[in-house]
Image (spheres, rainbow, N blue to C red):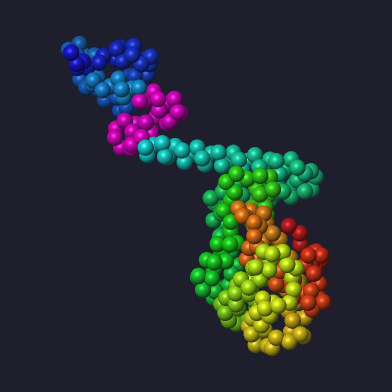
Amino acid sequence: MKRITWTIGELAQHTGLSVKTIRYYSDIGLLPMAERSGGGHRRYAPDALEQLRLVQRLRALDTPIATITDVATGERGIGDLVADELGLVQRKLTELRWREATLKALDECSGPERLRRLEVLARVQQLPEAHGDLVRSWQRTIPSSIPARLVDHIIAQAVPDPPSDPTAETALAYAELHALTAHPQFPVYWVCPNVRDKASLYSELLDASDLADSLVSAGEPPQPGEALDHFSEACARSRHEDDTPGFRTFMGAQLWGTIPLFQRYWQHVATLADEPGPNLGITHCWLVEALTTSTGVGSLSDGGPQVAFQI
């Protein structure tokens, strides 16, 4: 014969839970009471045993009582609960991996370098906020006259996602990006104070980088050619000048003096890349070095100009 109701003692006997615990679950709505006996004792519906066993299994997974209550009352399905809890665990694991990578990066050095790394790495321990901060830094850096599609294109390459399984090297590289964008000298390279039509210049420089991409991918050293001509002509047009040898020497000196921060930034981006290959900044630096070496200004690969700032 089908059981009609359960007493609290019977539920305790079948589940191994104490009467006190079952009463608590009942009081908070996890186990709705069916009725009371003539003597005033609690009695529970036929499905109460299975519901209690579900509660036990969820508690074994350290599921919060409030979450279990939502499942028990039908406000959430078990599938939703699992997805939410899995997301929470993954976020905690990411935080732990970042903490481990940070500590390893600090353990690999000592003295002033350890203190410098500590300051840099402290910027990126809150990952969602850190990523948003980096995006906003670039939005502030790129001139406001640049079309949104170009801004999005640059930011998509300039702002990598934080590595999901960081090493000491990649955690430090990601942190260095934040430190570099915060440096007061960083926006200098992007301002182009003598250029009125910045949108056209940016577009043409991106085209020049595309032309250089295959050369950089092939490991070719910076050299004269179509990509450099396109790059130099774009710079000359933006200043209403002719692309003469004298102009190239002038531009080479100008760029050689302002590019070190920019170059270091994109080297860190390359460290964080999932796949090998040049990025937008690396190809741009290749073009700048092709210009500076071809005009006798200097070579970035030899260390570039001696600058007063260090990151």
- Residue 9, position as x, y percentages in the image: 30, 12
- Residue 118, position as x, y percentages in the image: 70, 46
Q: Does residue 215 lie above or below 46 as drawn?
A: below
Q: Which one is in front, 64 or 243?
A: 243
The reply, left or right, for residue 223 in relation to residue 83 is right
The structure residue drawn at horizontal position 74% and vertical position 70%, both measured from the top left corner, is 222
Which secondary structure type mostly characterizes the magenta part of the structure? helix
* Residue 78 in sight from this viewpoint: yes
Q: Locate the C terminus by quadrant.
A: bottom right
* Residue 254 in sight from this viewpoint: no
Q: Which one is in front, 307 or 272?
A: 272
The structure residue drawn at horizontal position 66% and vertical position 49%, both measured from the top left corner, is 170
The structure residue drawn at horizontal position 77% and vertical position 74%, both measured from the top left corner, is 292
Q: Does residue 81 lie above or below 26 as drawn?
A: below
Q: Is residue 64 magenta?
A: yes
Q: Is residue 63 magenta?
A: yes
The reply, left or right, for residue 258 in relation to residue 134 is right
- Residue 280, position as x, y percentages in the image: 62, 66
**Which segment is the magenta one?**
54-78
The reply, left or right, for residue 104 in relation to residue 61 is right
Q: Does residue 155 lie above or below 198 as drawn?
A: above
Asked where in the image residue 3 lies, by quadrant, the reply is top left
Asked where in the image residue 270 lies, by quadrant, the reply is bottom right
Q: What is the count of numbered marks?
A: 0
Q: Locate the N terminus by quadrant.
A: top left
- Residue 168, position as x, y percentages in the image: 68, 45
Q: Which one is in front, 40 or 213?
A: 213
